Image (spheres, rainbow, N blue to C red):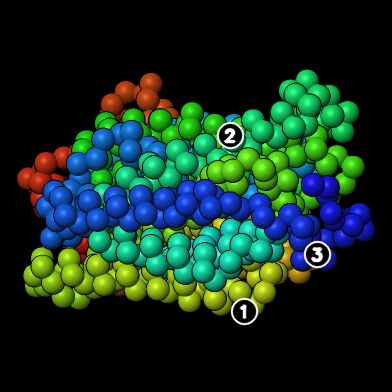
Amino acid sequence: MTVCVKKHTIFSNRSQETIKMDPSDQKIFTVIDYVIFAVLLAASMGIGLYYALSGGRQRTTQEFLMADRSMGCLPVSLSLIASFQSAVAIIGVPAEIYTHGTQYWFIGCAYILGLLIPAHIFIPVFYRLRVSSAYQYLELRFSKAVRICGTLTFIFQMVIYMGVCVYTPAFALNAVTGFELWGTVLATGLVCTLYTTLGGLKAVIWTDVFQTVVMFAGQLAVIVVGVQKTGGVADVWRKVWEGNRISGLDLNPDPTERHTFWTLGVGGVFLMLSLYGVNQAQVQRYLSSRTEKEAVRSCYMVFPSLQLALALSCVMGLVMFARYYMFIVCFPQMVIYFVMDMLHGLPGLPGLFIACLFSAALSTISSAFNSLATVTMEDLIKPQYPAMTEARATLLSKVLAMSYGLLCLAMAYLTHLMGDSVLQVALKIFGMVGGPILGLFCLGMFFPWANSIGALVGLCVGLVVAFWLGIGSILTRSTRPLPLECSANVTIAIQTAFNNITLRDFTPCPTCGTVDLTVGELLYVMPGTLYPLLGKLFCFLPEHLKKKLCCVTPLGQTVSEKIDLIAKNLATFIYNVFAVE
Ligand SMILES: CC(C)(CO)[C@@H](O)C(=O)NCCC(=O)O
Ligand code: NA
């Protein structure tokens, strides 16, 4: 088979749809390939059925939404990777490496802090409060209003994301090989809806494990065959070296530059924190762990696997460059073209890659369905109907998981109607909304004097700024992809600034809880919702100074200690009021 793409179409980004396999090569897929794709769907379905019929048979919300809080660290860690490794990344990263060289690979540096901070700050806070949803934290720390606004923002973010995640791989595959578009979208969407609804979080986590393995296997197959067909490792290396694709560390401080150490290293940490620190899909997996230690361990285990995932997609981009280095620009569809060019004639391997692509998609949308069902149940419905029976709550959670599954198909159709360009916009929205949500949680944990009005104003302003930057960068076609760290910082800045205005009185009390007096409202900061950041940073100071510094009681008190503290704080507050009089 020859590269049947006319040169001018490769140079022009606009005529992407002309990149198609040669019609005489339409027999890329043999029966075996279709069987492998069917086996992926059937095995995922089987895991769903297994967890519907074993264990507690999904009769409680504890089992359906939290996997009975009994998971070990290995499945949790593989599931953590699978949630946010979508097909968008699998075909997007090789295209990026092909066009701009290996600079993007430096995002691997951000995984260090991007996983250490969730492991030692976010996990302990969430785990010890024994919440079910990350947004429950926001009510404990701020107020009900903040919780509901956070939940709605998250739902908006994930609903847009899941449509893109199921549509993108089907669309790219269809455009290049003619693989049935809507059949694929419907099959993956419906199978995923079924196993998520039947088997709950246990099924979601165990299918993630299976799908992560398929994902790695598919990418590895492309690389091994690709290197062989391109003339061996030495030849690939020579071509990418001569083609200037091996990038050194770019320390240019200009934040509008495409990828530099700063945008990747610093921006990458913010991206990782918004995904691995506070996103409900991930928080739920930490909370489903048997113990806090297991949760922290699973977060550590994400590091090597995520590095492997990154390395596989970067190397795939390099092999692809060695193959087609005469073309300058590469776009995602060309990655599919490359894969099929490498694997055709090897029965089963094209099927394995399709399974890899849809494993990535399935594992992401199943996490979305389950986490969306959880927040809708725990944050929006349960507080309204506290007397609801467990059986009814479980049934409702299943209905919710199914409804979000069907909504995902509707979103995929909407994405299709709006056309190709909306894909980029939708992915940007995912990143843009992540920033202000991250800002909200950081504000709560690290700023004892932050209050609920500040949090709400900050969230709104943060969203406006994120959209302004995001939409602006789309209109001006700037190449800088995620204004996430910027909007997270703006959120925190606005929130703290606003707090200084609304704060009339700030009294660290003797037992080091805090009493905030705001416009007509008394705010008590619940113990365990703050992370003693300053205390940890200045750990060398004597104990009484540290306590003053962070105004925080240590995490993990008993209930009676908490009640005791609340009483003391109230007493202090009353004393202060009357002392002023
Ligand atoms: C989480 C990272 C940064 C890991 O490299 C990457 O997989 C990513 O940007 N994921 C989110 C976008 C997506 O894959 O859909
Ligand atoms: Na995935």
Residue at 70%, 58% (x, y): give it. Answer: 26
Disc 2 marks which residue? Answer: 220
**Disc 1 residue type?**
Leu
Judged by depth in the image, the label closer to the viewer, 3 or 1, is 3
Secondary structure under the numbered disc 2 in the rendered image: helix
- 175 to 218, vertically: above or below: below
Q: Is residue 419 above or below residue 433?
A: below
Is 172 placed above or below 270 here? below
How many angstroms separate mark 2 from mark 1 (CA)?
34 Å
**Sequence order check: which comes first, mark 2 or mark 1?**
2
Q: Residue at x 37, y 70 (%)?
A: 404
Circle 3 SS class: helix
Which quadrant is the C terminus positioned in? bottom left
Front-most of residues 367 and 503: 367
Q: Amino acid at mark 3?
A: Thr
Look at mark 1 in the image and give the residue it sits on: 417
Q: Is residue 318 left or right of residue 536?
A: right
Q: Decide if residue 278 is in sight here.
A: no
Amino acid tagged 2: Leu
Q: Is residue 328 left or right of residue 449?
A: right
Could you tell me which secondary element the residue under label 1 belongs to?
helix
Measured in 3D between alpha carbons, the distance from the residue under mark 3 to the one under mark 1, in whole angstroms, is 20 Å
Q: Which residue is mark 3?
A: 18
Q: Residue at x 87, y 47 (%)?
A: 328
Nearer-the-camera pick, 203 or 389: 203
Q: Residue farthest to the right?
A: 8
Q: Earlier in the sequence, mark 3 or mark 1?
A: 3
The residue carrying mark 3 has its beta carbon less than 8 Å from ligand 1: no
Is 333 placed above or below 250 here? below
> Disc 2 and disc 3: Cα gap in Å?
28 Å
Q: Nearer the viewer, mark 2 or mark 1?
A: 2
